[in-house]
Each structure stands twice: as structure tokens, then as C-alpha cells.
Amino acid sequence: TLGSVEHLVATGHEVHYLTKESFVPILKLYGGPIQIHSISAHASLRELTAKAGELKQYDFSAVYDLHRNLRSRVVTWLLGAPFRRVRKFRARELVLFVLRRKMFLRLYGAALDRAGECLELVRAERGAGAMTPAVRPVLRQLPAAAVGSAHGVLGALGERYVCIAPESAWPQKEWPFGRFVELARRLRASGLGVVWLGMKGKLADAEAGPGVVDLFGKTTLSEAAVVLRGAALLVCNDSGLMHLAEAVGTPVVAVFGPTSRELGFAPSLPGSKIVDADLWCRPCSKTGRLCFRPINRRRCLSDISVERLFEAVSGTLSESGRTRESGVTPVMTRETDS
């Protein structure tokens, strides 16, 4: 959604952004001139009504619902201002999960880009001739305290490093952790530092030792952003940290199992890559909770070998030529591969 925010700011609008409390740190990292408002993770109707009453004082000229869920609908109705909602095609997607990837491409015409859809909604309303910044702007407001904290931990590495984030919000989307461990061993053998990164605080049995830093559950979002900004690359699943890495200019090599780029959430930086398996049953769902295979379940993940992921990482590192200079984000020249 930040591309939409930048477009509105650039065209002279005062922007207010309502989100869950847990996402406020991300908006603060964005650093743009916006006013941030928040609700709790499981806001009740009473809380939503109170929040809408509080926001009515700003007399908004327009409201954009870029989420289109029940809570965002309720707040939009309560505010009473003219509004527009992004489309999500949920019924069509449900059919496509049965008909598979070729039908996704046939009915949509091209890979979806949810950020682009949000931006297009705002541009269509505000005038297509206005300036349009990049759809995925870089997060630029990294707090000095977070920078100092992260550099203090990573200073001991003294070398170029790769971040590995083996978590996902949905366990069914996670490549086997043991394979991440084997990948880390191979990266260390090739002379790269390894930083294990995760927000849940689990999987802390990752192998430690010289050149390895375990930051599972030990960073704030701001600190994680700093760690990712200094990394040569992030290796991860289809997850939130994948998008955070790209937002600070770091390419990713992402394992896509039950999901696929046709769903519209693929990495977009030049230099980023998706590693996946070409199976008839993909994509099966956005969360991976559905698996249509009667035998050999989760094959979309088990078919991806350590060797294949290591080759993708090695290729990306050699092409990007990134150095571990804090705050430096070189221009990438390679198109995203599948």
C-alpha cells in the first residue's frame, strides 16, 4: 500500500493511515509525512465505532479501503466519507485454486500485483496524469538506536553475510528446517557469514559457531530491517520478512511451495528469485493449509533440494555484487527469475 501513500503525498494530500497496532512499526520505518492511527489485532465493533468517531474530526475528502475485510468495511461505512475499495476477486480465486496455474494466467492475463492494484485504484481516482512514484518504495526511516543495536551484534561477523529466515506465518509454507541448516553449512563453507532471523522466537536450535549469529526472536522490526539492509541476500519462505527485505533494497531467494507468483505476492526486486516445484497441484491456497495430494503430501516443498537452493543463492550473489556496506543499496540489473 505504500506506493498509494507516496502518490497521495506527492500530489499534495494529507494522508491518514489506519492499521493494526502490530503494523505501526513498519509505517514508522517508511518515514513519510503521514498520520498513523491504529486498532488492536482483534478489534471489536465497539472499538471500531469509537475509532471511527475519533477519526471523523478530520473530515476526510476520501477514504481508500486497500484491505477489503470486515473491519475495514465497518470503519469505511462509519466514517461516512466517499470511499473506494480495492478488488480481491475471492470467488474467482477459489475457482482458480481448483483449475490451477494455467487458468490463473488465462483469466487474469498476467501475474497479479496487489500493490499495483492498490496504486491503480488511487491513481484512477486522483488523476492518471499525476506523478506516480515506485509501487514499492524503500523504507528509509531506520532509527539510530536500531542501527546501533544491530551493528553491535553483527560487528563480530566482520564479513559479508546472508540472512536466513526459515519461518512463515503459516507452517505449511515452510521449507524443511533441516534443509535450511544444511544450506547454512554450505554458505559458511563458501566463506559467507550467516544470520538466522525470525520474529517468532522459535527454531533456536540452529547451529551456532564462528561466522553465525542467531537472532531468532531477538530483534524488533526496526532492528530486523537494519540487519536485512546490511545483508547481501535473504533466503526465506513466502513470508513477511521477504517483503521487508525488498523494502530496504535487499534481494531475496524465496522458496514458494503451496503458493505461486500468480497470486500476486511475489518478490519484485531485480535480482530476487523464486525457487519452486513445477507441480500440477500448485497453487493450492494462500496459506498452504489445503493439500490436494492423496499421497506424498507437501511435495511442493520436499521436491526442492538444498543443492538447487544453494545454486540459486550463489547465482544471485555473483550477479548482484553487493557489499556489506551499511546503508548502501546498489542498483540491480537482473530481471527476476522463476
Image (cartoon, helix red, strand yellow):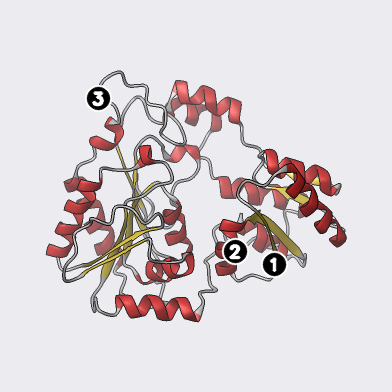
Q: What residue type is labelled 2?
A: Leu
Q: Do the residues labelled 2 and 3 touch (CB within 8 Å)?
A: no
Say which residue appears at 19% left-offset and 42% top-offset: 305
Q: In this view, does 69 lie above or below 104?
A: below
Badge count: 3
Helix, strand or loop under label 2: helix
Left or right, 220 with respect to 152, comes to right
**Quadrant where the N terminus lies?**
bottom right
Q: Earlier in the sequence, mark 3 or mark 1?
A: 1
Q: How crowded is mark 2: few (under 14 residues within 10 Å), some or many (20 or more)?
A: some
The residue most toward the left is 189
Q: Earlier in the sequence, mark 2 or mark 3?
A: 2
Q: Residues within 10 Å of mark 1 (few under 14, many from 20)?
A: some
Say which residue appears at 83% left-offset and 49% top-offset: 79
Q: What residue type is labelled 1?
A: Ile
Say which residue appears at 46% left-offset and 76% top-offset: 146
Q: Are marks 2 and 1 in contact (CB under 8 Å)?
A: yes
Q: Nearer the viewer, residue 174 or 272?
A: 174
Where does label 1 land, which residue?
Answer: 34
Where does label 3 land, which residue?
Answer: 296
Q: Is residue 89 above or below residue 256?
A: above
